[in-house]
Image (tube, rainbow, N blue to C red):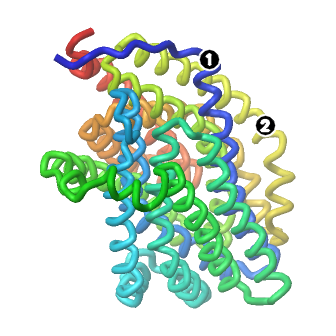
Amino acid sequence: MRPVHPFEVRNRDVWTIALPATFAFITEPLAGLTDLTVIGRLGDAGLMGGLVLGVLAFNFIASLFFFLRIGTGGLVAQAVGARDPTEGLVHFVRAAIFGAGAGLVLVVLSLPIVKLSEILLGPGETVVGPFETYLYIRLVSAPLTFVNFALLGWFYGRARATTGMVLQFAVHGGNIFFSILFVYSFGWGIAGAAWGTVIAQALSFIPGLFLVVRHSGGIAAMRAALPRTALLDTAALKRLVVLSRDLIIRSAALEGTYAVFTALLARESAVVLSANALLLNLSMVTAFFLDGQAQAAEQLCGKAVGANYRPAFERAMRLTLGWGLAIGTGLFLFLLLVGPLAIDFMTTTPDVRAAANQHLLIASLVAVTGVHAFVMDGVIIGATLNRVIRDGILVASVAFLVAAVTLQPLFGLDGLWLAMHVFFIARGIYYWLAVRRDRMNLFPVT
């Protein structure tokens, strides 16, 4: 029988994790918006389209390895709940070694990756050159990016949200600074935006590893705490492989949905692609605000599973969903008020401004329709219900495709945005029902 380790979940516990995580996560879309702005203000829709598709391609590739972040976070949170004295350090080391190796492989395979991305995304004649430049450079950062995923998973899984916040500030703050410096001061154009991101990843990688080693008492103590038998434990490796497989499928389906959405827009024109890229980034700002609650749900629900204490799990889920709905509603109203000003600031192209403002209302609704999907992501990741998160995203992706095929011919670009709302709502409903069905099995004693 598994031991039970009771603990209380309060609003303060949620916000101790959610607040620094929110500040950290919100810097990611701000960095993306900065890149769009510095390139958009150059007044060339082709450059902006190349940036949009380059970011999309790299993010899709990186999403296949995002299990290094979310898988590590869930496993570490459970280790904390089970009162593991090393706080799940072995999960981080396994993930970091794998991430570094996988990133180096991607650097070696840059040429075929870029060419395959061109075939799949079909950039236009004015877009293809900037797209290639950006993606080749961004792939250099893959090893750093993947180890940073593992670092964040370990820190957030241990409820060290402030440390995670500082590391993400380093990445995204560095990206903003160096992108502006390289594009405007050095005149490097789209290459400057890409190199700014590469350097920023190193700004998180170096101090992150230092903090892990210091927490472990030095390299010698770290090696003593992690004998080779622990790193190569067959049962643990099998669990990681199964978890990784399902999370890779989840990430591929998630990014694939965004890729289809963007690819359908890319067939329209550079103006439409650029306008909707602005809207997608603005609307996704809400996702990163809500990810603070998802992060709290991940750590607290994962800790509850490790502690074998169902009341804490139930309480954490209720609190994070309630706060998520309140935040989402406020963000929707905020985007309606501030959105037009933000659009005018981010681009100087009149046609792009007009197209973005035309669809601002329907894009802003993501702040409300995405609440359950975003927060329940954290609940499921913390509980390591990998099959639920895999199957839910596949069901939602199919719902999106059906909606897109049906609604785009009827409502045009608004139809595509409606299909995106279908994607979020379907995902949230599936996750909610699945967790209510499976949570009894998570707590065999209580």
Residue 354 is situated, as x and y percent measured from the top left of the image, at 78, 60
Task: Residue 373: give its label.
Answer: none
Quarter of the image with the C terminus in it: top left
Image vertical order of residue 138 relative to residue 397, above or below: below
- Label 1 belongs to which residue? 11
Q: Which residue is more in the foreground, 381 or 220?
A: 220
Which is in the foreground here, disc 1 or disc 2?
1
Q: In the image, what residue occupies the spot 66% across and 82% down?
A: 46
Quadrant position of residue 369: top right
Q: How many marks?
A: 2
Decide which of 53, 167 is in the foreground and name it. Answer: 167
Residue at coordinates 40% horizontally, 12% vertically from top-left?
Answer: 6
Q: Are marks 1 and 2 in contact (CB under 8 Å)?
A: no
Label 2 crowd bin: few (<14), some (14–19), many (20+), radius 10 Å: few
Is the residue 310 above or below the residue 194 in the image?
above
**Of callouts 1 and 2, which one flags the residue occurring earlier in the amino acid sequence?**
1
> Which is more toward the observer, 82 or 308?
82
Q: Which residue is mark 2?
A: 334
* Amino acid type for the residue under numbered disc 1: Asn
| Residue 362 seen in this snapshot | no
Residue appearing at x 58%, y 19% in the figure: 322
What is the quadrant of the N terminus in the image?
top left
Q: Give the residue furthest to the left.
A: 234
**145 sits to left or right of 349:** left
Q: Secondary structure at mark 2?
A: helix
Q: Quadrant of residue 55?
A: bottom right
User: Can residue 315 be seen?
Assistant: yes
Please, what is the three-letter code of the amino acid marked with disc 2?
Answer: Phe
